[in-house]
Image (cartoon, rainbow, N blue to C red):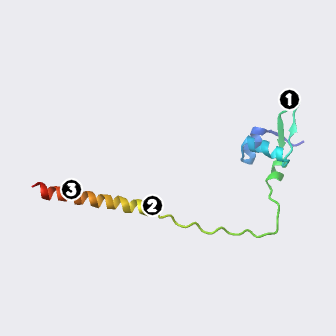
Amino acid sequence: MAKQLSIGEASKYVGVSRDTLRRWEKKGKITPTRSPSNRRYYTQEQLDTLLKKPKTGKKAVPLPAPKPSLAPLKLVFYSLLALVIAVILVLLVQIFAF
């Protein structure tokens, strides 16, 4: 007989939360066996079958490469701009203070 996994053990085995397993049960994707105290128990075979993706015969369409973000460059630019302005202000203060 296959080993029965509790909902906590099954969630760790599959890599999803306990609530996800409960939702899958409501949707009819999986049917756990119940103990006399109404606890859910799953077999590894059930979980393995659930995780297998059906073959549709369609080829996977590759996603486009993400565009590089300019945010880090903007941050560097504005930091350097602030530094240049600060240096200019310090020089102006020194020139006109004396």
Label 3: state its secondary structure.
Answer: helix
> Which residue is under mark 2?
72
Graded by Cα atoms within 10 Å as few (under 14), some (14 to 19) or many (20 or more), the crowding at tag 3 reads few
Instruction: Give the number of the mark in front: 3 or 2.
Output: 3
Q: Decide if residue 38 is on the left or right side of residue 87.
A: right
Nearest to the observer: residue 93 or residue 50: 93
Instruction: Give the number of the mark in front: 1 or 3.
Output: 3
In whole angstroms, how far apart are the C-alphas of marks 2 and 1? 57 Å
> Which residue is under mark 1?
37
Q: Which amino acid does label 1 sit on?
A: Ser
Q: Quadrant of residue 55?
A: bottom right
Q: Decide if residue 20 is on the left or right side of residue 1.
A: left
- Say which quadrant the N terminus sits in: top right
Graded by Cα atoms within 10 Å as few (under 14), some (14 to 19) or many (20 or more), the crowding at tag 2 reads few
In whole angstroms, how far apart are the C-alphas of marks 1 and 3? 77 Å
- Say which quadrant the C terminus sits in: bottom left
What x and y, as percent, mark residue 87?
24, 58
Residue 94 lies, with reference to residue 30, above or below; the image says below
Residue 57 lies, with reference to residue 33, above or below; the image says below
Q: What residue type is labelled 3?
A: Val
> Which residue is under mark 3?
90
Q: Mark 3 vs mark 2: which is more N-terminal?
A: 2
Q: Decide if residue 47 is on the left or right side of residue 69.
A: right
The residue at the point 13 percent across, 57 percent down is 96
The residue at the point 75 percent across, 40 percent down is 9
Give the numbered dot on residue 86. Answer: none
Label 2: state its secondary structure.
Answer: helix
The residue at the point 83 percent across, 47 percent down is 27
Residue 15 lies, with reference to residue 87, above or below; the image says above
